[in-house]
Amino acid sequence: MKEKFRCSAEQVKKYALDLISDHSSKEEIRQHFRECPGCLELFEQETNLSQQIRKLPRVVVPLDFSMAVMQKVRAEAGVSSRSRKTWQVWSLAASSVILIGLIGTYWPEFISNPFWDQVIIDSFSILVRTLESGIRASLAVGHAMILTLQMIGGVLAYFSRSSAGLPSLWFMALTTLFLFSHFLLFYLLRHQERNTCK
Amino acid sequence: MIDQDAVLVRWALQGDVDAFGEIVKKYESAIVNYIYWMVLNRDDALDISQDVFVKVYQSLSKYNPEFKFSSWLFTVAKNCTIDSIRKSHKNLVSLEEISEEDEGGPGMQFEDCDSPNPEKSLLNKELGSNLKEAMNELPGVYREVVVLRHIQDKSYEEIAEILGLPLGTVKNRIFRAREILKELLVS
């Protein structure tokens, strides 16, 4: 609701600050100023003060200021990218460990598999069996533990430096998906095995 | 209308450092001058301003595009300045801390914002000089709102956002600040 203008010093000062935005009040106040020289003088003093403050000298920013800032920013960006590379290297190393672990687990099972002939006859069957034993073995040797450590690493990286943590977060998500798919496959195999036994 | 700042921020977040350079160029003067009126020392203002932009770059991902970028920038500038003052044990409102150089000595580089006729210029310079002294004497909390309102041309709402204060408090502070300024000018 629009406030009615009253002839008082406080009101004039207030309007001197707010006037610009309120066009409807403007005409009413101008009319009052035409009739009240005291208010007009006070208003002019107020607006003059605002103008004088606006005209205060300003610090000249040196030409090399932005260059100096950008030098620091680029150094900062370089640190972020180095940090990101470090995490990518670690992620790659962890993936390699998992891959070697999985090959190491599957390979003896694959070689010594009594159902070798079935590889040709029924490749799916052998794949399922090797996978099943592989999952068991990999879980037994702490495969899950490696994944958990990676997840913790990813979370820590994310909270320590968000830009560097993003690839780690992606890796964490993929490894989690990998882990869950293992568990799902394991469950399906067990279920199939039970049905076959029956 | 496309918010240019928001676009530059997005590009900077995508790794375009030059986009951040554009932000620096756009706001360097405003930030340096805002900080200057808080610390009353040109060199300190320039040093703190550099830290402000680096800090802004580091925490760019935390910026919420729902709010005005300039308001967020000024909030970071305010916090950095307060931290810097605390670290150097300087008093925000102290006059004793102002060196001779800052009082308009050879090291001080200012640009004049107006160019009236010589006679008027002399009068304005005198008033400007008195006003500058009055501004220096103004307590920090009041000087801050005056600078944001009359030098940086911020709206009441933006000032409230920058300082994290209710709108009413901002209006009262500006009103009170002007009263103190006038008293100082008269005395």
Image (cartoon, rainbow, N blue to C red):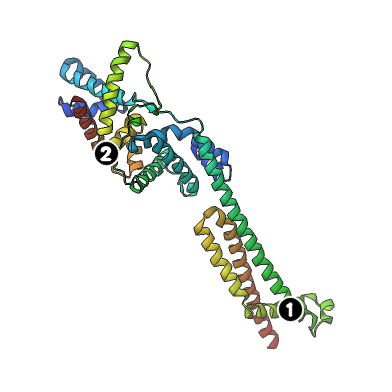
Residue drawn at point x = 73 percent, y = 76 percent: A104
Instruction: Give the camera-side residue of A159 and B137.
Output: B137
> From mark 1 to mark 2, how far is it between C-alphas?
78 Å
Quadrant (top left/top right/bottom left/bottom right) for the C terminus of chain A: bottom right
Query: According to the image, label 2 marks what residue?
Result: B94
Rendering quarter of residue B67: top left
Which mark, residue A130? 1
The reply, left or right, for residue A113 in relation to residue A22 is right
Could one spot residue A197 in this view of the protein?
yes
- The amino acid pointed to by label 2 is Ser
The reply, left or right, for residue A28 in relation to residue A107 is left
Element on which disc 1 rests: helix
Instruction: Give the camera-side residue of B133 and A179.
Output: B133
Horizontal and vertical percent for residue B181?
Answer: 23, 30
Question: Would you call the spot at circle 1 few (<14 residues within 10 Å), some (14-19), or many (20 or more)?
Answer: some
Could one spot residue B3 in this view of the protein?
no
Question: Would you call the spot at circle 2 few (<14 residues within 10 Å), some (14-19), or many (20 or more)?
Answer: some
